[in-house]
Amino acid sequence: MSTPVDLDVLPDAVLVLDRDLCLQALNEAARRLLGPDADARLGQPVGEAFRVRHGSGAPALRGELPPHDGQIDLLLARTDGTDVPVTATIGAHDAGVVLCLRPAGERSGIAIISTVSHELRSPLTSVKGYTSLLLSRWERLSDEQKLTMLEQVLHDADRVTRLVTELLDISRLETGRLVLRRQMVD
């Protein structure tokens, strides 16, 4: 038996839908995003309740899920009638659908992790490959080949160091531990 989740502890706006795409629950972040009286739309089809549309203006989430591969950009109407562009992550399961909404333009943690992983994997693959080659064929490689490979390893190690430093700087900026010093320059 699964434990119920307190949706209000989640940072993203979350809408829980049944199989017919009717709104069953939402969290506090969703109320902030869609309007304080969003609860009044519980039980209604989400596509109609929030006039959900694709970026092109075509209706969305009306009777069926849109084709998606992780995230999809949508427009939802707030309870005051203004439009909110969001990036939705759709999770479909036997009991229904969960929509995680982020204001458009904000990257999700998953997307950031995916990008960072890719950026780190490339130089690390090169370092591992060249190191393995140097260790297994040291005697058969010329000094020029060894030098070229070691220079590439150094270059890629510097790239990884730079990426990690940038990540740490971003983390410090977000937590307020890194303060920018502004000054006039030519």
Image (cartoon, rainbow, N blue to C red):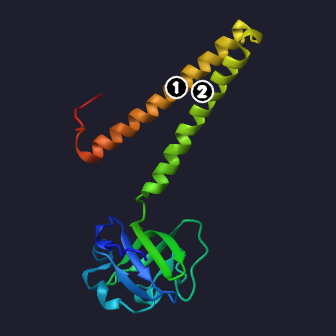
Above or below, comparing residue 86 to residue 105 in the picture:
below
Spot occupied by residue 39 in the image (x, y as percentages of width and height): 30, 86
Instruction: Answer few, some or many: residues within 10 Å of disc 1's Cα (few below 14, many 20 plus, some between 14 and 19).
Output: some
Q: Secondary structure at mark 2?
A: helix
Return the residue nearer the eye: 52 or 109: 109
Query: What residue is disc 1 on?
Result: 157
Above or below, comparing residue 88 to residue 134 in the picture:
below
- In this image, 110 relative to 140: left or right? left
- In this image, 85 relative to 137: left or right? left
Spot occupied by residue 60 in the image (x, y as percentages of width and height): 53, 82
* Quarter of image, res 9: bottom left
**Residue found at the far right of this picture:** 140
Spot occupied by residue 81 in the image (x, y as percentages of width and height): 34, 84
**Residue found at the far bottom of this picture:** 43
Per the rendering, the mark at residue 127 is 2
Above or below, comparing residue 86 to residue 50 in the picture:
above
Q: Residue at x 59, y 36 (%)?
A: 122
Q: Residue at x 55, y 23 (%)?
A: 155
Spot occupied by residue 135 in the image (x, y as percentages of width and height): 67, 18
Q: Residue at x 28, y 43 (%)?
A: 173
